[in-house]
Amino acid sequence: MSLSTAKTILRTSYSMHFTVAINKFHTSFPIYLDQKWRAVRNLTKNPNTTGPLVNLSDYSFKDNKPVPYASRQLKRIQKHQEYMRKIIKLVGEIDFAVERHNRLLKEKEEQEQKILDSQLKPKGVLPIINQ
């Protein structure tokens, strides 16, 4: 079997199921799922990334003591915590930048007003106004 035929994508008729044959290994990719159907129902593109089978524990104890994490669940939790730390840090930096920009604009306006006030002082004797 040649390399070009080994890398062909096979499609069954009237189905959205695709299979890729590479070196006699058959795999299906989530990208070849019916994405329109999944988008209409607000589902994720890859059904294997979320859901109760991925996020929940495999079993529970009757006395409600904690269950050890499943495979890669701790890494997934740590990854999400790291995302939250980064989000909080970046949002704080954006807030600081916005406040600094507003403060600099206000200081610039005050400086311009101070210059205008110092330049436009009346000179000489003030006119007498009828009381």
Image (cartoon, helix red, strand yellow):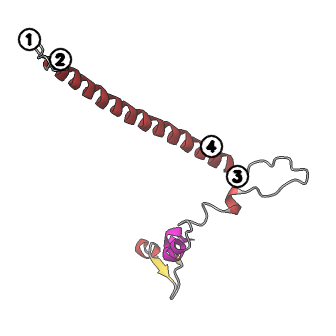
Disc 4 secondary structure class: helix
| 2 or 3: tag closer to the N-terminus | 3
| Above or below, 14 relative to 74 | below
Q: Which residue is labeled 1 in the image?
A: 124
Name the residue type under label 4: Gln
Task: Measure how far apart labels 4 and 1 are at the Cα level.
Answer: 74 Å
Q: CA distance from mark 3 to mark 4?
A: 13 Å
User: 39 or 128, which is in the foreground?
Assistant: 128
Q: Nearer the viewer, mark 4 or mark 1?
A: 1
Q: Are marks 1 and 2 in contact (CB under 8 Å)?
A: no
- Which amino acid, by three-letter code, is at mark 3? Ser
Left/right placement of residue 69 relative to residue 30 reads right
Mark 2 surroundings: few (<14), some (14-19) or many (≥20) residues within 10 A: few
Label 3: few (<14), some or many (≥20) within 10 Å? Answer: few
Query: Which residue is nearer to you in this view: 19 or 108?
Result: 108
Judging by the rendered image, the residue that carries numbered circle 2 is 118
Disc sitting over residue 78 in the figure: 4
Name the residue located 13 percent from the left edge and 16 percent from the top edge. 128
Judge whether 51 appears above or below 86 on screen.
below
Q: Is residue 71 magenta?
A: no
Q: Nearer the viewer, mark 4 or mark 2?
A: 2
What residue would you read off at disc 3?
71
Magenta stretch, residue numbers? 20-40
| Residue 30 covered by magenta stretch | yes
Front in this rendered view, residue 62 or 116: 116
Which tag is nearer the camera, tag 3 or tag 4? Answer: 4
**Residue farthest along the left direction in this orientation:** 124
